[in-house]
Image (tube, helix red, strand yellow):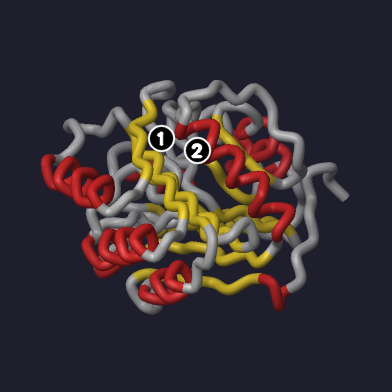
Amino acid sequence: MPSWYVAINSSQVAIVVSPTNSSYILSVINEARCCIYVEAYELTYQPLVNELASLAQRGVAVYVVLSGNVYGGVPEEEYAVVSELRGAGVHVSFNYGFDYVHSKVFVIDNETVIIGSINPTYYGFEHDLGIDLIINNSSIASVFANIILDDYHNVSITQINYPGIVVSPINSYEYLSDLLSQPGTLYMALEELYPSSSLYGLIQEHNNRLILVGSHGENYYVVNELGAVMINDLTAKAIVVGNYVYVGSINLTTRHSTKIGNWA
């Protein structure tokens, strides 16, 4: 059994697939009693913004970390959202310590983690095909809460002292290469999977595989080389090998060193 393996009881986990049941994320967030921590690449989905503002006004401590670097620049819509959230008492910080903060993570009351690839934007919730896990585990939740708070204060993280939690660039190559080296049929759904990725060779070694990719860049080569199926609007980042599962927000590209919190 790999050292990073962590067993989670099925009763502790719920699966969200956008856009089918992405509204369930709002229902879970609405149950926050004391605190909620959020880390996201972009945050513009107005129903979620309204929910976070309402929680803060009810006395719930709300912390939000957003990427200070966004491809094409931080949208003006997000600046308006930040102003609205701060006006409601939400603590918002932009993190500039990495190329991108690509996470999509919520921690509720230090008990529940929502993590995966669903962007808290209109397209993320209501259009794109993404996958999130909702994990009810206080130990895991506390680790993610501390990661988000460190990112909120722009404090550098050098190690993760809990198995199964993948944070790029700290331990992502180690964990994902070990996962992809496990025997068994390989199932993958990845928005971006490029031959230039340092992990591409391990994927090629799996003779039995089913791979779904989004319609991006070098993914076209993967369709020809690995027989991958291209899916429009796919944003999922999920890998299954044998009995092991990874769900998060890491794309397997040459940029996989960006800052991302994930679960494996």
Earlier residue among tags 2 and 1: 1
Q: What crowding class fits label 2: few (fewer than 14 Cα within 10 Å), some (14-19), or many (20 or more)?
A: many
Q: Residue at position x 29%, y 28% from top?
A: 69
Q: Residue at position x 39%, y 50% from top?
A: 191
Q: Which residue type carries mark 1?
A: Val
Q: Secondary structure at mark 2?
A: strand
Q: Quadrant of residue 2?
A: top right
Which residue is at the front of the view, 50 or 259? 50
Residue 165 coordinates in the image, percent (x, y): 67, 44
Q: Quadrant of residue 70?
A: top left
Q: Residue at position x 64%, y 71% from top?
A: 13
Q: Which mark is residue 260?
A: 2
Mark 2 and mark 1 in contact? Answer it, CB < 8 Å: yes
Q: Which residue corresponds to mark 1?
A: 101
- In the displayed structure, does residue 236 sit left or right of residue 54? right
Work out whether residue 37 can be spotted: yes
Q: Quadrant of residue 169?
A: top right
Residue 128 coordinates in the image, percent (x, y): 29, 63
